[in-house]
Image (cartoon, rainbow, N blue to C red):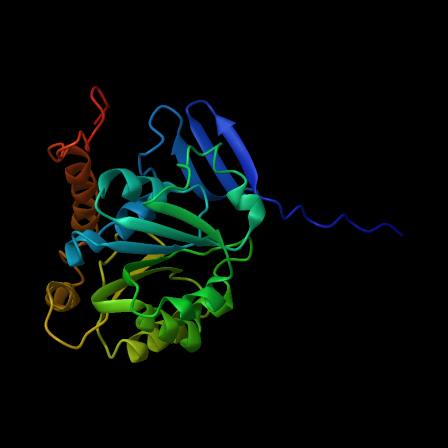
Amino acid sequence: MTTSSPPDRRPQVHTRGDKRLLEFQPGMVQSEMRLSRPDDLVLSYARAMMCFVLFHPKPEHIVMVGLGGGSLAKFCYRYLPHSRITVLELRADVIALREQFAIPRDDARFRIIQADATEYMASLAGAADVLLVDGFDEEGLPPALGSAAFYADCRRALRPGGVMVANIFSYDPQYGPMLRRLRETFQGRICWFRGIAGNNRILFAVKGGKPSPALAMQQRVARSHGLGFAILNRLLAHWIVLRMRWKPALPGGVGPRPGSDP
């Protein structure tokens, strides 16, 4: 009697022409990068998550759960020059791929921490303006990252008017319970843009209290799920990313590199 060998659960990197892919399971692309333009956001869900700038245009501190190929981390590092970025990543083998995906080295504005986000988040009370939760593994979204306890820690980690952005598959069997937990934790202050990223449902939750621009935007988006139609929401995400890339350079030369492609 023979038994099949256990699946290889190491992250897999594949380079095909100008593309470099990160997969946790064959055929399941976790991250994608253009070698010619490593700071681009190739996948629609990543562009959709960047819609947080509608809620909080100039966050002082962005905390990300899940590194992957670093698409969001690289984009925020380059195009939000006033923001400090902390990335929480559980797996050392994912962090070890940072050079292959052109992820910047740690510096005064950027830091990757190997940590279990469900444990580390509790230490961040009142420390973040934006939380980006995108911590998938080969099985999908770990249950702990959709628990009531984790959502409560996320709310405490945000400053007043801060926004949490959660990437959840709409077909996840736990999608309904996670949505209810998020709504209860943030006292109903959640919204999403209809059809903006296919099966990836990108949820925005705002820490309320006093009136804030983020809360006003949440209420506006919640009324019609963004611009109402999926195609318009996808175009909105594209427009936001292009606008960030092509805004005028700031003093000190911060801005798009000369000669960079649109």
Give the side of residue 161 with respect to residue 63, left or right.
left
The image shows residue 119 at horizontal and vertical percentages of: 49, 68
Above or below 30: residue 121: below
The image shows residue 107 at horizontal and vertical percentages of: 37, 41
- At 16% from the left and 41% from the top, the residue drawn is 239
Position of the C terminus, as image quadrant, is: top left
Number of marks drawn: 0
Q: Is residue 104 visible?
A: yes
Q: Is residue 197 visible?
A: no
Instruction: Place residue 104 in its image quadrant.
Output: top left
Above or below 20: residue 149: below
- Which residue is at the far front? 108
- Which residue is at the far right? 1
- At 10% from the left and 67% from the top, the residue drawn is 216
Query: Of 242 and 176, which appears nearest the observer?
Result: 242
Query: Of 199 and 124, which appears nearest the observer?
Result: 124
The image shows residue 175 at horizontal and vertical percentages of: 40, 68
Give the side of residue 158 with respect to residue 213, left or right.
right
Instruction: Place residue 187 in its image quadrant.
Output: bottom left
- At 13% from the left and 69% from the top, the residue drawn is 219
Above or below 45: residue 194: below
